[in-house]
Amino acid sequence: MKRLFALLATFATVLGLTAAFSPPAVAATGCKVDYTVTSQWTGGFQAGVKITNLGAPVTGWTLAFTMPAAGQKVTQGWNATWSQSGSAVTVVGVDWNRTLATGAAADVGFTGTFTGANPKPTAFTLNGVACTGSLEEPPPVPVDGTPVDVNGQLHVCGVNLCNQHNRPVQLRGMSTHGIQWFDRCYNAASLDALADDWKSDLFRIAMYVQEDGYETDPAGFTGRVNDLVDMAEDRGMYAVIDFHTLTPGDPNFNLERAKTFFASVAARNAGKKNVIYEIANEPNGVSWSAVKNYAEQVIPVIRAADPDAVVIVGTRGWSSLGVSDGSNESEVVNNPVNASNIMYAFHFYAASHKDNYRAALSRAASQLPLFVSEFGTVSATGGGAMDRTSTTAWLDLLDQLKISYANWTYSEAPESSAAFKPGTCNGSDYGSSGVLTESGALLKSRISTPDSFPTS
Ligand code: IDC
């Protein structure tokens, strides 16, 4: 017997089959791969790979595939451990997605480079079994309950926003305009429409500090923010309390106001599960170290009153992770805010901010927890033509990376970033095609698709 084994082993080695004598990988009897290039630019691209296990449940998986063209290289992957040797790419599931029941899927993705052509990869295998499955995708099963019912208290886990089941979630929703100007747009009917018709998961409350905002009436604005938090909570939506600093761009200008404001709203809302604090909308004209210093003074004030809420920290260059100031995410990666359970804001305006911003977000997404707490479909002025192509590329990327977002604005402001036509807020219709702008119609179509929040 021993002799036979040795003989077989020798024979196998000659044939290059030593792996046959290793402990068997957990077998899958079938699989399906959906490969989608979500965005492509000169010499670079981003792709999503959805792996569906059609075989027996697996407790660990390795996806392998071949890059057909010589210049195709994976530069950065996410939601798995990625490696490449020549044309062979290997993708190994990580802690939270390595178990796949029959029919379950894992979403992974990567950014890559290419020279010349960028053909679709071939020869996908899952644990060594060819992925030839072509079962129709079942439509996502809408879960019962509101976003807050299903997800409960959120927290940051790794680079993701996670729900009460410790699973990554993406929240999709809308931001108010400045509540000092468009308060009339936030009432029972508009919040009902946002929750029921738009099926929004979150509502960002943009409380400007200057420009006739908070500084003119701290008690009044604090009260109004709290009322809007309650209105969101009543409808099962998350509320982002946005301390909307903009001009001046150094958040330290408002440090004392921020401490006063957040001490108050954090104490008042500590018992709620739906509140996320955003401490500085868009730092600009200021160094990252100054923003970090501000954050490290404001976050403890929030934690003292509300220890478990997620906090979003603005980033340099109008929350572009420094990109709009000629820097990039490395200044944050190398010098992160000294606090836990925080995310970093990334803002973009689709007609102004394109491939290099998408590339920065893609790189940063595997290293930093990111939250797109504001973006527009138009130019950074809030006006100009809607850029459908760029907006779609952005939203596909955010969906792929499970990055939460809020769109500027759920308002009737006379500018193309607003979702409603002027005059809408005099009425009670906040959802039909007659009241929506081009941007509003696009956002409603994106936000209202079923959520697929993990429930266990
Ligand atoms: C814009 C509003 C506009 C207002 C202006 C000044 O759309 O009506 O006059 O602010 O307050 C941001 C800011 C956000 C801007 C928006 C569009 O966070 O306050 O709103 N924008 O310019 N960053 C990038 C773009």
Image (cartoon, rainbow, N blue to C red):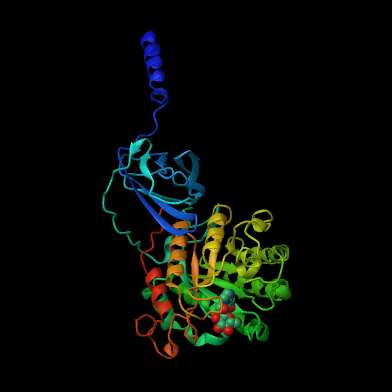
Q: What percent of the width, then of the height, locates residue 252?
A: 73, 72
Q: What percent of the width, then of the height, locates residue 266?
A: 61, 69
Residue 115 drawn above or below residue 263: above
Residue 264 drawn above or below residue 180: above
Residue at the front extreme of this rendering:
116
Q: What percent of the width, then of the height, locates residue 383?
A: 51, 81
User: Can the viewer see residue 178 in this picture?
Assistant: no
Residue 178 drawn above or below residue 393: below
Q: Which residue is rendered at x = 58% and y = 53% of the image?
A: 367
Q: Which residue is rendered at x = 30% and y = 44% of the image?
A: 54
User: Can the viewer see residue 364 in this picture?
Assistant: yes
Q: Is residue 54 left or right of residue 75?
A: left
Number of on-image labels: 0
Q: Is residue 250 left or right of residue 71?
A: right
Return the residue nearer the eye: 58 or 417: 417
Return the residue nearer the eye: 134 or 454: 134
Q: Is residue 332 left or right of residue 19?
A: right
The image quarter in which residue 315 lies:
bottom right
Q: What percent of the width, then of the height, locates residue 249?
A: 68, 74
Q: Quadrant of ligand 1?
A: bottom right
Quarter of the figure that contains the N terminus? top left
